[in-house]
Image: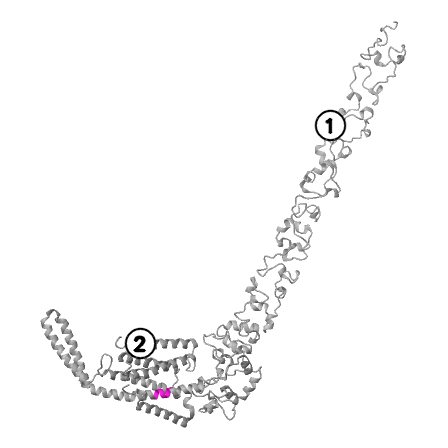
Amino acid sequence: MSRNKELWLAILCMLLIGGLYGLVTIWYREVPAASGLFGHLIGVLGFILMLMTELLYSLRKRSRTARWGKMSDWLAFHIFTGLVGPFMVLLHSSWKFQGLAGAVMLMTVVIVVSGFIGRYIYTAVPRTVDGAELQGSMLEQSLAEMDAEVKRMEIFKDSVAEKEQEIRLKVEELKKEREKLQHQVGSLARARRRLAIWHTVHIPLGMALFTAAFIHIGAALYYATLLH
Amino acid sequence: MNKRIGCLTSSGLISALVTLVIMIGFVLAQGYELFSPGPLSSQAGTPLGGVGSHADIGGECSQCHTAPWNKTSMADQCVNCHVYIADQLADLNSLHGIIFRNNLDIACRSCHPEHKGTFAPLTVLKKFDFPHDNFGFSLNKHKIIWNGKGLKCQDCHNSDFYNFDMNSCKTCHEQSDVHFMQTHFGNFGSDCLGCHDGLETYGKSFNHDDESFKLTGKHAEAICTDCHTDAQTKLDLQSAPQDCNTCHQSDDTHTGRFGITCDDCHTPDGWKPAKFDHNLAQFKLEGNHIDVECKLCHTDVEYQGTPQECGQCHEEDDEHKGELGTDCGLCHSAKGWKPSTFDHAQSTYPLTGEHETVACEDCHGNKIFKGTPTNCFACHAINDKHNGFFGPDCSACHNTGGWLPSTFNHALNRFPLTGAHVNLACTRCHSNFNYQAASAVCASCHREPVFHAGSFGTNCVTCHTTTNWFASYTGPHPSFDDHGGINHEGAACRDCHTVNLISATCTKCHDSNNPDD
């Protein structure tokens, strides 16, 4: 749970919003129209969440001066808004996927899928506790420190017999960690390459989505909301 | 910032630009269809300006949509084509005229949505924004129909909203209760709108107690058609007669004899108990009559023309067996048979004196009042102390003031009373009330006095009269004729006969009994 808490939280939020949507549907005996009060509300809120998804994590990631919160938390928030926002926009569509609005919805789905893929590529790159990417030399240094610690522990284990079990477990844990780190060192170049490619696709997709979304909003305001 | 954020990267900006170009390309190639939320209706109507359906102007958004800053509204655009609607808006009695008169903020699209699909209906009156009330029928009670679903316009109007087939009422309502609807149609006809206005004025929610004629008692159990016969319109229902007779004429057991205002005696709680005020009738109920059951006098539920003569009801319990006639009231009152108040003075035998206090049955044994003999002896034979000697006519001597004093006329008798006899009490001569045995001989009462010394017998009248007991003897004086005769110088008998008549003395006048002295 704690490992993917943003995912579970997003699912919980989506269930709540979906339940509310269901109640409104039952109450009015029809699917809430995109142009209705409820449809508009979830559309506007969903789009704001999507904008937050697009901007906040990106700004924090690139800022050197304003380092509010840990990067990993910002990523969790990015994932949360990146799931809940599109879900609300999906409900806003009233299940009609035609014209520009349909295209925007389709792009939203694509970018969410892209985000899931990016999430797994991201974890392949070793990072510091606050989520900053580790450099190759730093990895080598970490490996050397681990080897020294294992050696020191094994010596310590022989001298303190009563703590033998505890020390042996710690050593095994260190060895596993070391093995993972070693694997990351081996695939670091490949992972970075994948992440770069993913960024190349994900960012333009996002921009295309938001461009289309803004045009959709403009057209809706022109043709529907502001019509008289 | 170490790097530009994603949206400002070259790939991001290029992507946005490409997206924009693609859209412009779409617009240039296919018009503004790109922004359409759905296909326009292809339902063809009478062509207006060469346009058969909205689908014909698909992509030409400006045909309907105006810019927010434009003064003309989308509704103006509608009536630009649908000119007849503009005409209706000017006519406040037309469909659209009524709608807009009562809903100034209503727009065409409130009822006529578009972009819902090629075959989607162009008139959708969801949530009853349509002011149906203005057309004489509220949809207030029709939000949900018999199957629990919401009412659709087509349920009543099919596809023609301008007309309404009342058969659709029957068709739909039969789904919930076919028997009721068939009966209802049979009773009230098929002009549903004649009575029903959707507000349930005369439907399930109708409360008859809100009307001038409240349904109470048995009336609450009646069905509508019991009173509202042949009602086909609301006016028929409202003008149902409220007088009792119209409905109850057929079951009026009095067959109209008591008029048409049943409620003078009855209430809606039932025909019984009735509360007829008999005191308003000719025959007022008093005394024991108050507690008598109606049917005892009014047999066969016949209340008018009931005979008022006592005998009509009391014939069976007339203890006089009819001999005193039928007017019991002459003697009796409604308070009871007793005490009766017969005025004997009006009869052939008025009661006077002691008779006034005599109990009726003393004379009228066996309660037979007629033909009772009026002769004294009929009653007094048993207590006739004369044992019939004086005959049956007691009144010859007595009156009703009492047996005594009696007034027997002795002069008519063989022994007329004269002189001192007149004032004698009867019993001086008639002892033991025996009047027959009394003798007329003087000696039966007057025994011979010692003074006579048996010299004169019993025939007193020889010397005495009833007026003067003193004797006036004029006969020969035995042995004294020679001595001055019987008058002897005016001497009375007792002057000489001081003891009795057979002895005499002279010494009362003379010095001795010797005549010579």
Q: Classify the position of the N terminus of chain B by image quarter.
A: bottom left
The rendered magenta stretch, by its main secondary structure, is classed as helix
Side of B512 where A168 appears, left or right:
left
Q: Classify the position of the C terminus of chain B by image quarter.
A: top right
Is B152 drawn above or below residue A209 in the view shown?
above
Label 1, residues with CA under 10 Å away: few <14, some 14-19, many ≥20: some
Report the front residue among B510 and B429: B510
Distance between the alpha carbons at the discs numbered 2 and 1: 145 Å
The percent position of residue B434, horizontal first and vertical second, equals: 74, 27
Chain of the residue where label 1 is placed in the rendered structure: B
Which residue occupies 44% across, 84% down?
Answer: A225
Q: Residue A209: say if magenta.
A: yes
- To which residue does mark 1 refer? B433
| Residue numbers of the magenta segment | A208-213
- Mark 2 vs mark 1: tell me if same chain: no
Which residue occupies 34% across, 76% down?
Answer: A15
What's the residue type where badge 2 is placed?
Leu
The percent position of residue B417, horizontal first and vertical second, equals: 81, 26
